[in-house]
Image: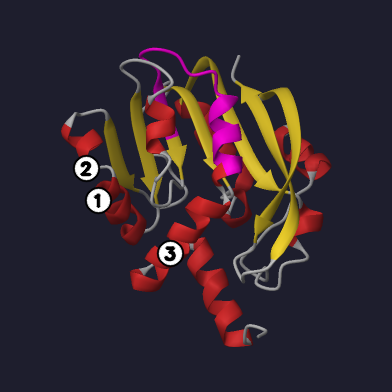
Amino acid sequence: MEPKKIELIELERQLSCPTGDNGIKVAENMNYTNIKMTLSSIENLELKNEDSILEIGHGNCGHLNKILEKGNAIQYFGLEISDTMKNEAERINKDFILNNTVNFQIYDGNTIPFPDNSFDKLFTVNTIYFWSDPISFLNEIFRVLKSNGIFTLTFAQKKFMQSLPFVKDKFMLYNNDTLKELISKTNFIVLDIINKTENVESKIGDFVEREFTVMKLTKK
C-alpha cells in the first residue's frame, strides 16, 4: 500500500528532528538502515587510543560500541537537537555513561557548545540536509576540531535522495561537486572522497540502491 501524503510529511518531520514515540521508532529504523554509512564514517576517522570524538546528530546512538572498541580510553561526545534522541541514547548506552566514557548534550543546531580545538575526530551522518547555514556550521566544526584532526561528513547522493517520496522541503540535497564547492568556502582540506553503493530497505519499506559518499576532511 502506498503511504499517504500526510504520512510522508510526518516521516520527513521525524527524520529532521525525531520526537515522541513515533520518533523513537523512526530512530530505530534509521540506526538499522544507516549502519553501513555510519560504520564507513567511523572507519575513516582512523580512531586511536585516547582520542576525543564528537558526533553531530547521533540519533539513538545504537552504534556507540563500534566507536569505543576502536581504542582504549576514547572519549565520546554526542550532540542532538532532539530531546527524544538524547534520552534514547542515554537509555541505550547507560553502562558507558556510568563508566564516564560518553556524554550526550542538546544544542541549538547552529552553535557547537565546546571550546576551540576540543576534538581529535568528528563525524556526522545524514544531517547536512538539515543545516540552516551550511558554511557557518562547517566553520563551527572547523573551530572545535584540533589541528590535523579528521572530520568525516557522510551523505546520500542527491540523485538517490530525489527518488524518495518523503524528501521534500526540509531537505537540502548535495552531490560531490556541490559539496566540494561548499567545502571550498571554508578552511577545510579534502583528504579523500569515498563513494559507495548499497542495497537498503527504505523508510517506506521497499528496497532501493543507495549511493552515498564519505567526505574525509582535515584541519591544518
Q: CA distance from mark 2 to mark 1?
A: 5 Å
Q: Residue at x 57, y 86 (%)?
A: 6
Question: At x 29% / y 48%, what residue is drawn?
Answer: 92
Does the stretch in magenta take in 170?
no
Q: Earlier in the sequence, mark 2 or mark 3?
A: 3
**Image quadrant for the N terminus?**
bottom right
Segment tinted magenta in the rendering: 36-54
Proximity of marks 2 and 1: CB atoms separated by less than 8 Å: yes
Q: Position of residue 8 (x, y in %)?
A: 60, 78
Contact? badges 2 and 3 (CB < 8 Å): no
Q: Give the residue number, with chain letter if any, for mark 3.
A: 18
Specify the label residue 94 is tagged with.
2
Residue type indicated by callout 3 = Pro
Q: Label 1: state its secondary structure.
A: helix
Disc assigned to residue 91: 1
* Crowd tier of the residue under label 1, counting other residues whose Cα lies within 10 Å: few below 14, some 14–19, many 20 or above: few
Task: Measure the C-alpha gap from mark 2 to mark 3.
Answer: 20 Å
Precedes in sequence: disc 3 or disc 1: 3
Front-lying residue, 186 or 67? 67
Q: Is residue 15 left or right of residue 79?
A: right
SS for callout 3: loop
